[in-house]
Amino acid sequence: MKRSIRAAMVLSAAAVVLLAGAVPAMADTTLSATGASGRMAVCSNPYEPTWCLYARDTLTDGHCARWQIETSTGWQWWGSSVCTGTEQFVGALEVGRLRVCRTGIGNCSRAVFTG
């Protein structure tokens, strides 16, 4: 009886290891437009992720990096603007189609979906 319980425990542990290995790792995503860049990083449980958003702008022409989120009425500014070359946290988001842009210029990165 003890041997069958031990075997069941070993098989259960092996199943947990196999299932954990089957879950894909969520990596940081970096987007860029001329002068601006943004980074998305998972900042919570990878099964129900919240994405932490960071931005920076390396140019000194008075324009800034800022995220945009796509809504039913089009692209809307989201989070804080960053006007320095030092990466700064601008907010967190669970789901949405996002891109990073330069304010006042109109150039934006490709869009990515966080869901």
Image (cartoon, grey):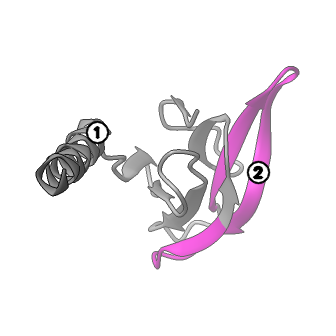
Mark 1, other Cα within 10 Å: few <14 / some 14–19 / many ≥20: few
Which residue occupies the foreground of this view, 96 or 100? 96
**Is 110 drawn above or below residue 89 in the view shown?**
above
Horizontal and vertical percent for residue 11? 18, 43
Q: Amino acid at mark 1?
A: Leu
The secondary structure type at the circle numbered 1 is helix
> Which residue is denoted by mark 2 in the rendering?
78
First along the sequence among labels 2 and 1: 1
Residue 46 part of the magenta segment: no
Horizontal and vertical percent for residue 87? 48, 74
Horizontal and vertical percent for residue 65? 60, 58
Residue 83 in sight here: no
Residue at image location 58% in from the left, 33% down from the top = 115
The segment highlighted magenta reads: 64-90
**Is 69 drawn above or below residue 28 in the view shown?**
above
The secondary structure type at the circle numbered 2 is strand
Find residue 64 and name its label.
Answer: none
Q: Main secondary structure of the magenta part?
A: strand
**Farthest front residue?**
1
- C-alpha distance separating marks 2 and 1: 36 Å
Number of numbered discs on residues? 2
> Which residue is denoted by mark 1 in the rendering?
19
Q: Amino acid at mark 2?
A: Trp
Front: mark 2 or 1? 1
Residue at image location 53% in from the left, 30% down from the top = 111
Residue 114 in sight here: yes
